[in-house]
Image (cartoon, rainbow, N blue to C red):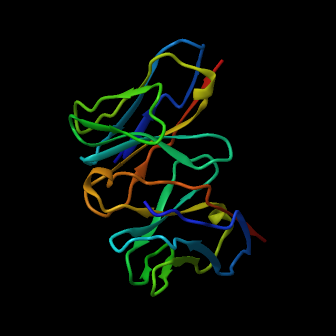
Amino acid sequence: NAGVTQTPKFQVLKTGQSMTLQCAQDMNHEYMSWYRQDPGMGLRLIHYSVGAGITDQGEVPNGYNVSRSTTEDFPLRLLSAAPSQTSVYFCASRPSGYTEAFFGQGTRLTVV
Amino acid sequence: DAKTTQPTSMDCAEGRAANLPCNHSTISGNEYVYWYRQIHSQGPQYIIHGLKNNETNEMASLIITEDRKSSTLILPHATLRDTAVYYCIVRSANTGTASKLTFGTGTRLQVTL
């Protein structure tokens, strides 16, 4: 049982480059979310999805796009990377109802 | 979503109970209290959640005051592996925002020998 899998684990980008952070879950969870965590801070919600084909913005959506074409996958796209997007990115999923969320191990992104 | 207030850091001796407080004085009637922890730089890990009644599982106990304005997470016998940042989160019951978990800065628990 893989749970929530994030790839890559580490990435270095140059300013202006684009890339996609991958997130996949094999638990058939309806809800998926992307968070970012900056040094010494808590997690901030970027985008979330309550099911395939449905996405919405979180607290800090600017500079990021998401799509949810399948239940399993929820990729996060950086359109034009900026140094301010240097952070650790976490993906999470959970089933509907008041249940626990499962987090991936994170992607550490550095934009130079 | 209701905001939470937690102490920045706490220490606990190994083998002792760790009691982590959380204030959520603006919580509404249909909001649950969740606790997560984050060990080093790993992804957050769910610990426990509750609405009104006290809850216990294999990891911890959650004590919620009768007025629901505060709660305490109890790790009954803390070990060095419990050293982590602990987040107290209040989650909305609204369907559209039900997937949101609003993280604050949490409490950094240091368990020592």
Towards the viewer: B24 or A22:
B24
Left or right side of A84 for B51: left
Residue B90 position by quadrant:
bottom left
Using the image, determine if residue B38 lies above or below residue A66.
Answer: below
B111 with respect to B28 (left or right)? right
Image x and y of residue A54, in percent: 23, 37
Query: From this viewpoint, which residue is outermost toward the bottom?
Result: B66
Q: Is B82 on the left or on the right of B97, as rendered? A: right
Query: Residue A59 versus residue A93: which sits nearer the camera?
Result: A59
Q: Is residue A54 left or right of residue A105?
A: left
**Residue B110 in sight from this viewpoint:** no
| Residue A29 higher or lower than B18, as above or below | above
Q: Residue at x 30, y 34 (%)?
A: A73
- Between B79 and B93, the one lying in front of the other is B93
Residue at left 46%, top 75%?
Answer: B58
In the picture as drawn, the residue positioned furthest to the front comes out as B26
Depicted B50 relative to depicted B96: above or below: below
Q: Residue at x 34, y 51 (%)?
A: B99
Quadrant assignment, res A50: top left
In this orientation, does residue A89 appear? yes
Q: Quadrant of the C terminus of chain A?
A: top right
Which residue is at a point 63% across and 65% down the rendered structure image? Answer: B82
Q: Position of residue B73 (x, y in %)?
A: 55, 75
Query: Could you say which quadrant of the image residue B107 lies in?
Result: bottom right
Q: Position of residue A101 (x, y in %)?
A: 39, 55
Relative to A99, is B12 above or below? below
- Residue A45: x and y in percent read 46, 43
